[in-house]
Amino acid sequence: MAVILPPDLPARAALAAEGVPLLEAHDPAAADALNIVIFNLMPKKLETELQLARMLGRASVDVAITLAAPENYAGKNAPPGHLDRFYRRWRDVKLSSFDTVIITGAPIETLPFEAVNYWNEMTEVLDWTRGANDGAGIPLLSLCWGAQAALYRYYGVPKHQLEAKRFGVFQHRLTDKASPFLQCLDDGPMMPVSRWTETRVEDLKALPHLKPLLVSEGSGIGALADERLGHLHVLNHFEYDAETLAIEYQRDLEKGGPISRPINYFPDDDPTNPPPQTWRANAQAFYGNWVRWVVERKAR
């Protein structure tokens, strides 16, 4: 199906070149699109916009994407004027109506949540998403730090600092094959991981509504859900392009900090070899499952 994006957003040209159908907001067919607001906190705005729009634009229904950010969020790595031109701020978003919310990761995972300068606004966003009475809110897809933030706000689940960056492409086990989010995924899907902190299974034992869906022996929990509230929390990065980890690796090398090559990524563990996107089909199935689930929930 098609995706509706802000006019002139750079991702539009790339998606059109890839054959992803695009719709204009004024097109009559757009009236029935699934309205998604994405709080994009990732440092590389254009790359994340393209990655998520690609996944959502290949789902089974038309989707309309609104990009958003907190009031106190500067987005230092975004091109000049990009946020002012293409993003709506929280004060505007909270007065609007959306079918679902996506909150991305952010390069702040080693900070305590309360030390993040826009944390108060993020708690407002999360509370607005959850709604009243623990279930009258908006379906949520949270990613990486966004998932950790949601788990902390909703359940008090902590994040734990790792001794070294967990970095690479890890095989995951499907722990609930009946889950609507895991239909048509391979038995051992690969998934990119790039984290300095982790969420631990033992912290979920008193939370029976939170069900792990994807778990890796090498990287821990990959995704979990609370279907009661309509929340899907993904700690890793199905949306990543083939070269995303390579770019992160080169960036970390240039910074001079401690970094190892991403595991299970470069062919023959040689950074000069272009990495394959071994997770692409499973990623598309996962996002397609989530979109269908939101549509079905909306129709109830």
Image (cartoon, rainbow, N blue to C red):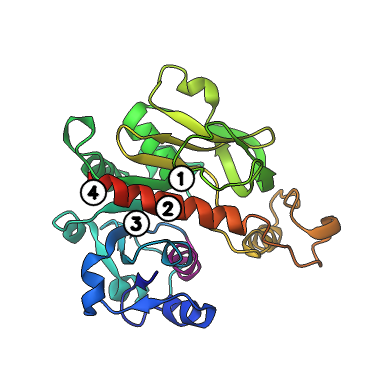
Tag 4: amino acid = Ala
The percent position of residue 126, horizontal first and vertical second, equals 28, 42
Specify which label sits upstream in the sequence, 1 or 4.
Answer: 1
Left or right, residue 92 beside residue 260: left
Q: Are marks 1 and 2 in contact (CB under 8 Å)?
A: yes
Residue stretch in magenta: 43-53
Tag 1: amino acid = Trp
Q: CA distance from mark 1 to mark 4?
A: 30 Å
Q: Which mark is residue 299?
A: 4
The kind of secondary structure the magenta stretch mainly shows is helix
Assess disc 2: are there few (<14), some (14-19) or many (≥20) residues with their C-alpha within 10 Å of its C-alpha. Answer: many
The percent position of residue 192, horizontal first and vertical second, equals 62, 51
Specify which label sits upstream in the sequence, 3 or 4.
Answer: 3
Residue under label 3, please give it: 39
**Dot in front, 1 or 4:** 4
Dot 2: element? loop
Specify which label sits upstream in the sequence, 3 or 1.
Answer: 3
Specify which label sits upstream in the sequence, 2 or 3.
Answer: 3
Tag 3: amino acid = Phe
Res 250 quadrant in image: bottom right
Q: Are marks 2 and 3 in contact (CB under 8 Å)?
A: yes
